Each structure stands twice: as C-alpha cells, then as structure tokens.
Amino acid sequence: MKYYCKNTHFYDFLTCHIPFFSGMRNVSLSSADAFVLVFSLADAASWEEVSRLRDMVLEVKTGSGGGSGGGGGDTESATPEAVVPMVVVGNKCDLEPDVDVPRDSLEAIVTFDWENGYVESSAKERRNINKIFKELLQQAKSRYG
C-alpha cells in the first residue's frame, strides 16, 4: 500500500528560536492535513504546551477554540469535515516520568476527551515509532479515505 502526500511540512513550534509570526503560523497550520504533537513524559510543561498547541490547531482548522489545557477540547462544535487527523505522542517513556504529568489519565484524556490518537514512545530506543505513523495513517484514511 502506497501513500502519497502532496505537501509535507514539518514544524517544530517548541524549539524554534526564531519568532514565529502568527500569520505565518496560521497559514502553515491551515495548509497541513495531519498533526503529530509530541511531548516529554519527563516534563510536565511540555504536556501543557501540547495541549495549547492542540487548541491552536483546532482553532485554525475549525474556527473555534479547542478547550482548556490538559482537560479537554470542544471538537463537537466543529464540523466533521474540519476535524483533522492528530496523534499525541508521549515521548521519553524510557526515562523516569515527571510526577506532575498525569500519566495514568493521559491516554483517556487524548483518546476519549480529545478524540485523537495516543502513543507512548522512546525515540532513543526506537520504541513505537512506526505505531505513531500507523495511527496517523489510520486517522487520515478514515478522514480522507
């Protein structure tokens, strides 16, 4: 099975040291077809940032807010056509987790409240890397398929 992507763009909103203008960010987000949002299981601040980025993506793609950080998102107000494939990845599962990261409820928040895919991975150990993209392709297939 082959998958072709017309436009593929990768943006690192967390570590980009150049100021990212909101207009450019909105154009980039609105032209993307799918999203992989990665946070560190060893850093609670990165979980909050992923929650904020998810809300930003939903706002740009649906024209409505995505909800508050950490707890939920309001995808019910979005039309089915506007909801985009998204996988949230908890990276660094090989490290000691941050006690402030709600690890026991992360998967439930992402899969049930946000209705997105969730995968825990370790880039260092190459654990579940393929699973991330399989989940994203499954979502894209059901969305665009």
Image (cartoon, grey):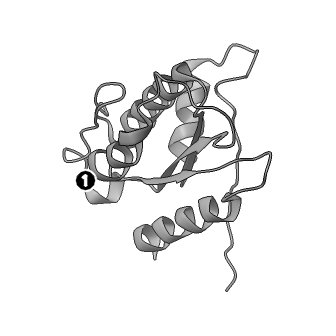
According to the image, label 1 marks what residue? 79
**Above or below for 44 versus 26:** above
Query: Residue placed farthest to the left in the image?
Result: 77
126 lies left or right of 40: right
Query: Percent from the top left, x then y, of residue 112?
Result: 28, 52
Q: Pointer 1: residues within 10 angstroms few (<14), some, or many (20+)?
A: few
103 lies left or right of 94: left
Query: Percent from the top left, x then y, of residue 66?
Result: 31, 34
Query: Percent from the top left, x then y, of residue 84?
Result: 43, 53
Q: Quadrant of residue 11?
A: top right
**Above or below for 81 versus 78:** below
Inspect the image, locate mark 1, and give the three-letter code of the amino acid beneath it.
Answer: Thr
Q: Nearer the viewer, residue 97 or 7?
A: 97
Query: Percent from the top left, x then y, of residue 108?
Result: 33, 48
**Above or below for 41 versus 130:** above
Q: Nearer the viewer, residue 118 or 30?
A: 118
Q: Quadrant of residue 54?
A: top left
Query: Residue placed farthest to the bottom in the image?
Result: 1
Mark 1, secondary structure of its residue: loop
Q: Quadrant of the N terminus?
A: bottom right
The count of marks equals 1
